[in-house]
Each structure stands twice: as structure tokens, then as C-alpha cells.
Image (spheres, rainbow, N blue to C red):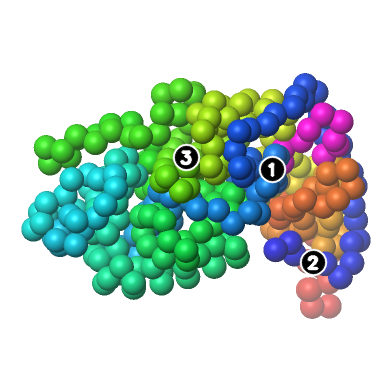
């Protein structure tokens, strides 16, 4: 949440130039769809995004996220008979087989193994029911308010559903997990004599695709959650019940990256502006960003930066001191802020320092 100040004692504007972009219309064959900029959370396109839908194996994004957070990747899991009897897509586990949790995650995300999902749930949650509780708890923490999970694999169930918007929230959290992205972006891997190939054809169809997960059941239709990256900008696309999902995701990314390129308003450690310093050897000090900030900007929109200082600066000023914030607005509406640090040390003027020293001497 942005930090609030009781007063703003000094401020100035820095206007960022906007790179013109040619926006174009986009649509999908999906019953529900959404396109979101990962770092800002800005929705770039949506279509019936709040409809409760069956989500099939895209469920496994949440299964993987919970397993990575709660489990030990190197832990050895002994496969139970229940897992081997699971219907649907499979990594073909055998009863009594021993694999690491990480190997099971490859089977989950590449082969879409429903058997892997059950084995993971038993190992990490103690049971499928215990793991499902962890899934729903995590979903609530991520703000997935219109979702409910009844199993770890996405098989059809009346209490198992989500929305395109909620799945985008999940995907944005998932792509911040390096382990999950590493596995989900792997096209093919051979572990322990078992070769697994990723079902996500976007990895081959589209430059910059970094996962995430496909899904299908007869009732749910084709479901797809993916993430694409270009020029440091990441977008997440979700389509539910979409018979043309490969093409639709590529079209969504072409639209998003061209119509809403990310404008970098601040870069970690780089100057954002400067502030005046009273009584210093120099009259100003550069202000550098404590973190980076970017926002997707469409043609005709204006991204502006306003510097708010906590108060006037008086020498000495030490480099690295937090002295205020840069506030970013899009067409006058605040979209974010970052802390500002002094980029240099500014010592007091020599005569001022001598006066202070003399005042401290005995008469």
C-alpha cells in the first residue's frame, strides 16, 4: 500500500515522453478471457472475465505453487495405489515407485499428470483433503474471491471452479516463483529414465512464452493460462472454454505488447530528480529510486512523476537517506509510488561547519 504523508513540503513534476503506439482491436473465441500486465496488475483486455467456469488442468498452477511453498523439492515420495488409479492425463506412475517432489512437479506441469497431482497432494498435504484446504487457503490469500477448489488436478466437480480474473491473479503470483517458472517453461526433460514433454505448444509457437498451463475436460472445454515476456514486460493471458486458444493467446500478446508497452518511470538506483539542500557545499542533491517502477501506457495516455519530499533538506545530507517519494500518475490518477533516496552525500559549507565548531569551544 502507498505510504501517506501528512503534508507535502516540496514537490515538482517531471513529465515522461510517451512512445506512440498503434492500438488495434482484439477478440477471442473464448467464453471468458483476460489479459493482464503482471507487474502493474493493469487489465489490458477482458471478456466475461468474472463468469464462474470449470478450469480443468489449469488448476495445477495452484497445485504446483502450494507444493513448492509448503514442500521440499528433494523429498522422496513413495507413490500410493490411489495415485496410479487416477483417471485422465498421466505421467504413468507405478505403485511403490519413489520419486522426488521436484520430479512429480515436472510430471504435473509438463505431462499434466493427474496421478502426479494426487501423489503431490498426499505427500505435501497428508491427504488430498488436507492439500485441498491448503489450496483454498492460498487462493483466498491471493484474492481469488470467486474460486473454489475440490481437488488438486482439475477434474470436473461442482465445487471446483474459478474465473478468468481469478486465474490471472494466480498466474501473476505463480510467475514470481522462480522454481515454478523454471519447470513450467521446460519443453522436455528426462529424469530417472522418464522423458516428459510439455503440453504447452505456445512455448514453441511464440517467442517469449514462459509457461504456464494447459487444460481440457469435455465439460470445461479447452482452457489455457500463459505468460509472455517482451522487453522486460510480462503479460498473463487466460482463456476458458476456447477452441482456438493457441491463436487467441498469440493475438492477445501481440495486442498487449503493441498497444500497452511498459513505460519505465523509475529504475532502481537511477536518478529521478533532484532536491535543493540548504547550507551545503552543493545546493542540490540527486534523488535516486529505491526500486524500479513501470506502467503499461496506451497511445494518448500521459504518465507523470511528482516528487514529494518529507521536508526541506539541510546539510549535512548522507547518501542513501530516505527523503520522500516519487508519485506516479496516469492522466492524473495515482498508479504507484516508490521511495526516494539521496544519491550523494552533501557536507555542510566550510564556514557553516567552522561556526558550529567555534560555538562548541569554551570562552
Q: Which residue is mark 1?
A: 46
| Neighbour tally class for label 1: few under 14, some 14-19, many 20 plus, Cα within 10 Å | some
Quadrant assignment, res 253: top right
Is-magenta flag for residue 279?
Answer: no
The mark lying in front, picked from 3 and 2, is 3
Give the residue at x 70% y 39%. Answer: 45
In this rendering, the answer to whether 253 lies above or below 288 is: above
Residue 356: percent from left, percent from top: 82, 66
Q: Does dot 3 land on a helix, a strand or a loop?
A: strand
Q: Nearer the viewer, mark 1 or mark 2?
A: 1
Where is mark 3, residue-wise? 222
> Which quarter of the picture shows residue 263?
top right
Question: Is residue 60 left or right of 188 when viewed as pictured?
Answer: right
What range is drawn magenta here? 295-303
Q: Which residue is mark 2?
A: 4
Among the two numbered marks 1 and 3 on one chain, the one whose residue lies closer to the N terminus:
1
Amino acid at each position: 500500500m502507498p505510504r501517506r504523508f501528512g503534508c507535502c513540503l516540496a514537490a515538482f513534476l517531471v513529465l515522461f515522453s510517451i512512445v506512440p503506439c498503434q492500438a488495434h482491436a482484439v477478440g477471442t473465441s473464448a467464453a471468458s478471457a483476460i489479459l493482464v500486465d503482471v507487474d502493474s496488475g493493469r487489465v489490458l483486455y477482458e471478456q466475461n472475465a468474472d463468469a464462474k467456469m470449470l478450469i480443468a488442468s489449469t488448476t495445477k498452477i495452484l497445485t504446483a505453487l502450494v507444493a513448492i511453498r509448503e514442500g521440499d523439492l528433494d523429498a522422496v515420495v513413495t507413490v500410493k495405489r490411489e495415485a496410479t488409479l487416477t483417471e485422465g492425463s498421466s505421467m504413468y506412475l507405478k505403485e511403490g515407485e519413489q520419486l522426488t517432489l521436484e520430479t512429480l512437479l515436472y510430471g504435473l506441469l509438463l505431462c499434466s499428470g493427474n496421478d502426479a497431482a494426487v501423489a503431490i497432494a498426499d505427500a505435501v498435504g497428508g491427504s488430498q483433503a488436507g492439500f485441498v484446504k491448503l489450496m483454498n487457503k492460498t487462493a483466498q490469500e491471493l484474492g481469488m474471491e470467486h474460486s473454489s477448489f475440490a481437488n488438486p488436478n482439475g477434474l470436473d466437480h461442482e465445487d471446483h471452479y474459478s474465473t478468468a480474473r481469478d486465474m490471472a491473479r494466480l498466474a501473476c503470483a505463480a510467475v514470481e516463483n522462480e522454481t515454478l517458472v523454471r519447470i513450467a517453461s521446460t519443453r522436455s526433460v528426462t529424469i530417472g529414465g522418464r522423458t516428459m514433454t510439455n503440453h504447452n505448444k505456445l512455448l514453441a509457437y511464440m517467442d517469449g512464452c514462459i509457461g504456464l498451463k494447459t487444460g481440457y475436460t469435455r465439460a470445461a472445454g479447452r482452457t489455457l493460462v500463459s505468460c509472455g515476456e517482451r522487453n522486460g514486460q510480462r503479460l498473463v493471458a487466460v482463456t476458458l472454454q476456447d477452441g482456438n486458444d493457441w491463436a487467441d493467446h498469440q493475438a492477445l500478446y501481440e495486442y498487449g505488447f503493441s498497444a500497452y508497452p511498459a513505460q519505465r518511470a523509475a529504475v532502481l538506483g537511477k536518478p529521478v530528480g533532484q532536491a535543493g539542500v540548504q547550507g551545503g557545499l552543493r545546493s542540490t542533491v540527486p534523488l535516486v529510486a529505491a526500486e524500479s517502477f513501470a506502467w503499461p501506457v496506451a497511445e494518448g495516455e500521459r504518465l507523470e512523476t511528482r516528487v514529494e519530499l518529507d521536508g526541506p533538506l539541510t546539510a549535512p545530507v548522507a547518501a542513501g537517506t530516505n527523503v520522500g517519494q516519487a508519485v506516479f500518475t496516469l492522466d492524473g490518477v495515482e498508479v504507484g509510488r516508490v521511495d526516494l533516496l539521496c544519491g550523494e552525500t552533501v557536507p555542510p559549507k566550510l564556514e557553516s561547519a567552522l561556526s558550529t565548531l567555534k560555538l562548541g569551544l569554551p570562552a
